[in-house]
Image (cartoon, rainbow, N blue to C red):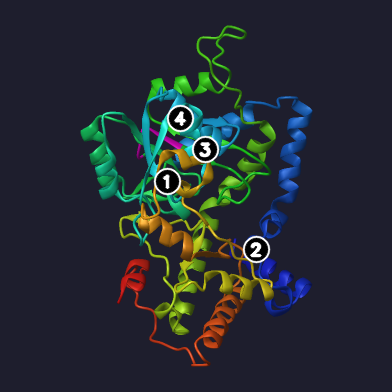
Amino acid sequence: MEVERKSMDAASRRGLGSPQTRGVPLLDLGRQHGPLRDKMALAVAAICDSGKFVLGPDVEELERNIADYCQSRHAIGCASGSDALLLALMALKISPGDEVILPSFTFFATASAVTRLGAKPVFADIDPATFNIAPAHVETLLGRKTKAILPVHLFGQSADLDRLGALARKAAIPIVEDAAQAIGAEWQGRRAGCLGAIGCFSFYPTKNLGGAGDGGMLTTSDDALADRLRLLRTHGMRPRYYHQVIGINSRLDSFQAAVLNVKFPHLDEWTRRRQENAGRYTELFAEAGLDRILGLPCTDPNARHVWNQYVVRVPDGRRDALREHLAEAKIGAEIYYPLGLHQQECFGDLGYGVGDLPETVRAAREVLALPIFPELTAEEQEFVVERIATFFTRTTGGHTLGGPKFLKHPLARNASADMDAP
């Protein structure tokens, strides 16, 4: 595997030139798919020959792989990560008048699944260090109408399922994990997807295990819930043309499953490379003295972080200018997310005010995601950090940046400490 990576890196440098001339993309799926292209083509061709295009043997194989990987008894394929969230809430019989607590700092699909069932999303603030939902705030939001807690394992790191689990058990309500960005993440040695009643995953191409289009998966160790999820994803139909409940059409197609089965054996190696890249960034930022300017991401000691994104905080209103500076050097960077969901126009009728959820609002002003994909080279990371150093040297009056070596404790330079200091 390492030989393959070195060969690919060398070929990339020969064919495309240095990062200074070609830039650094936020994500380059071509580098990942190149070595697997022939295997993926053969897998797709086999499906064309078999004619088993929907919920066929390839889907069943993927379901077995994911169930085992996520330490769950069952895995149920569906059409997308968004549908996984919707199906999970349908299986738990969330209905009009119910409330579901979830973070405001997340992708829209987390909340839209709630509202599509007529229920009310109740937005919680986040922990400033991990960007995940803050259990202390969740506790204040629990009420008579609360029917579920829906934490998001954001950017590849599990939310605090010890504290959230205790709250859920006390309130006798389930937890649904939005693990769309977090396949392989762990909390206290247990995998994302087995920590709540149902786990929801996405196979969108940008994810750590991404397909060639949309795809999703649900995990659960509850036999009855698994049976209900399988029923709901096929119009509530069993046997054929006899409908027990009103479900939806959300079946994972065999083409996506075939591609994912080819990629699946490489997932842990890709995760290791992401972790390696995250560690290298942190060291490079510290060597440049940028750890005293940027809020660097951290790993909770209870968690296994799988780094779907490497997200820094840029203080003092300079985030957008830094992004433009990187774009000039053809370096990809993205803002996840520019608004909390409670600030979105479509949720205006929920009545949130300007001062609500301050950590969510602050994160939305400051976050910037940098390239972290597995095939990213050390040379490319050095270029990214050098460009960021150039930006801050220029904007701080030409002072030379520099600083101590990175402190090895994983929480030594976390976002909370950097950004809350006077």
Tag nearer the camera, 3 or 2: 3
Position of 399 relative to 89 (above/below): below
Direction from residue 350 to residue 20 in the image, left or right: right
* Residue annotated with mark 1: 152
Most common secondary structure along the magenta stretch: loop
Q: Tell me the kind of residue under disc 3.
A: Asn
Q: Residue at x 62, y 8 (%)?
A: 241
Q: Tell me the kind of residue under disc 2.
A: Glu
Q: Are marks 3 and 2 in contact (CB under 8 Å)?
A: no
* Residue annotated with mark 4: 88
Count every numbered label the image shows and give the total: 4
* Residue annotated with mark 3: 65
Tag nearer the camera, 4 or 3: 4
Q: Are marks 2 and 1 in contact (CB under 8 Å)?
A: no
Position of 30 relative to 102 (above/below): below
Q: Helix or strand or loop: what does disc 1 sit on?
A: loop
Residue 198 lies in the magenta-colored region: yes
